[in-house]
Image (tube, rainbow, N blue to C red):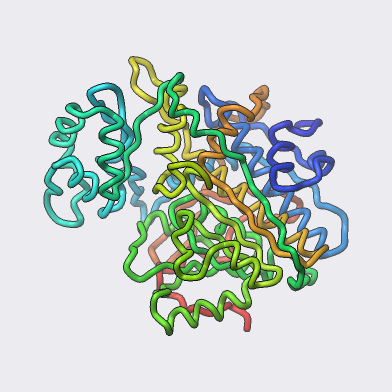
Amino acid sequence: MTSEPDVTTVRAWRAIGGDADLTTEVSYQGAGEVLPAVLPVRELARATVGACSLAAAELKASREGGALPRVRVDEAAVATAFVSERHLSVDGRRPTPFAPLSGFWRTADGWVRTHANYPHHRARLLTALGVGTGGTPDDTGASSVGPLTEALAGLTASEVQERVYAAGGLAVAVATRHDERSLMCGHPLTEIAVAAEGGGRRLPPASLPASGVRVLDLTRVIAGPVATRTLALLGADVLRVDPPGLLEDTDGHIDTGSGKRSTLLDLNSPEDRSTFDGLLDSADVVVIGYRPGSLDRLGLAAEELVDRHPGLVVAQLSAWGWSGPWATRRGFDSLVQAACGIAAVESTGGGRPGVLPAQALDHGTGYLMAAGVLRALTERQRDGRGRLLRFSLVGTADWLLHDVTAEPVGGGLHGSVGLIVTPSPYGLLRHAPPPIGYEGAPTDWAAPATRWGTDRPVWVEG
């Protein structure tokens, strides 16, 4: 176990408004060289989970009026959780994390990174580059690999990036170590604004830190769902809300939907909007993973939510930050790695870009978001005020590149921890256990993911 506060954990804790002195309660059980990389991924991973575990312990102590539980985080559990999507199996079937058209591709002057896991993104990518979409909507795009390779080879990386973006697809030019595009990584790890007035309810004593906390989950694809999955682990009533026409990847939902419920509401429908507003009126937390400004036309701008609902904690996530020309662009972990210079740093040789050993920007940001929400609830216990929290994948990328400190590898056996076997509506699951570690922390979720979009839009209690 470590005896002194880990400097990266202290930085993460301070970023979410925590008292640095409390980090003396955090220690880590080493597991060898897990999550090996050029960049200090192991240190980022354990620090974000450590901060989240400390935030859970702090809220528990605040609710019970007792001593702060000690925090002990197992690095093997952290490493396993950071690749939870790779460990998942459903009735023995292992999901495929990336589709054939998601990856690195040579261009006339360098490389681009594409993301085409979803059918609509795949179709837009191919249409933008003049390649036939080829086959049925269920086609993974494998038949288009050759034609896409040829089309990309005749264009510069920037041309591909802008052409695909204009068509609503996802592709970014891969930054080199000295590329000016890497300057887009200048965003803070977190931003916190406190509401002017109080009025939030005080949470009563409970065995779990977030027990009875009502969370509206408006997120998709790993980072936001990891945050809300963690809140559900800690006792929150988490209701994920999706629009009816925007289908979710089933395996992704199974992986990140543990402990949560899932419903469909069309916020353009008066009836569904009334239902949503009723949920919002009694919510404690709203977690938003949609691009900046995308909910504003519905009167659901984050600032307005905090102003209109006393005590409400709103946590927002974006890929590319909250300012600059890319702020409203779509993005995923793999694209941010490519555009910020991480792919160049992790190059495998021969000029080919590399990747981190996990989608660490997603998972790290997810645990940091959960930590921020838990801390905001602790602060609300004292002053009744809501908070607006902002996180971004690009902010986490900048932190990894410039402000995460490499530490000596601790002792322990190299590898992962044992997986959990859980019956579910989708079949028999084998999945990673939660990495949150404080005295008395739950070791599994109360329930597996329900079937996407099938739950009633109501809170569990009242």
Residue at image location 65% in from the left, 72% down from the top: 309
Position of residue 380 measured from the top left corner of the image (x, y, whole percent): 76, 63
On the rendered structure, is 71 left or right of 21? Answer: left
Residue at image location 83% in from the left, 52% down from the top: 68
Q: Looking at the figure, which quarter contains the C terminus?
A: bottom right
Residue at image location 58% in from the left, 48% down from the top: 391
- Vertical placement of residue 324 versus 159, above or below: below
Residue at image location 60% in from the left, 70% down from the top: 237
On the rendered structure, is 141 left or right of 263? Answer: left
Position of residue 83 measured from the top left corner of the image (x, y, whole percent): 48, 42
> Which sits in the foreground, 83 or 238?
238
Position of residue 394 measured from the top left corner of the image (x, y, whole percent): 51, 39
Looking at the image, the residue that sits furthest to the top is 350
Position of residue 30 measured from the top left corner of the image (x, y, whole percent): 66, 32
- Vertical placement of residue 422 versus 76, above or below: below
> Which sits in the foreground, 77 or 397?
397
Quarter assignment of residue 78: top right
Q: Looking at the figure, which quarter contains the N terminus?
A: top right
Looking at the image, the residue that sits furthest to the right is 66
Label tally: 0
On the rendered structure, is 83 left or right of 58? Answer: left
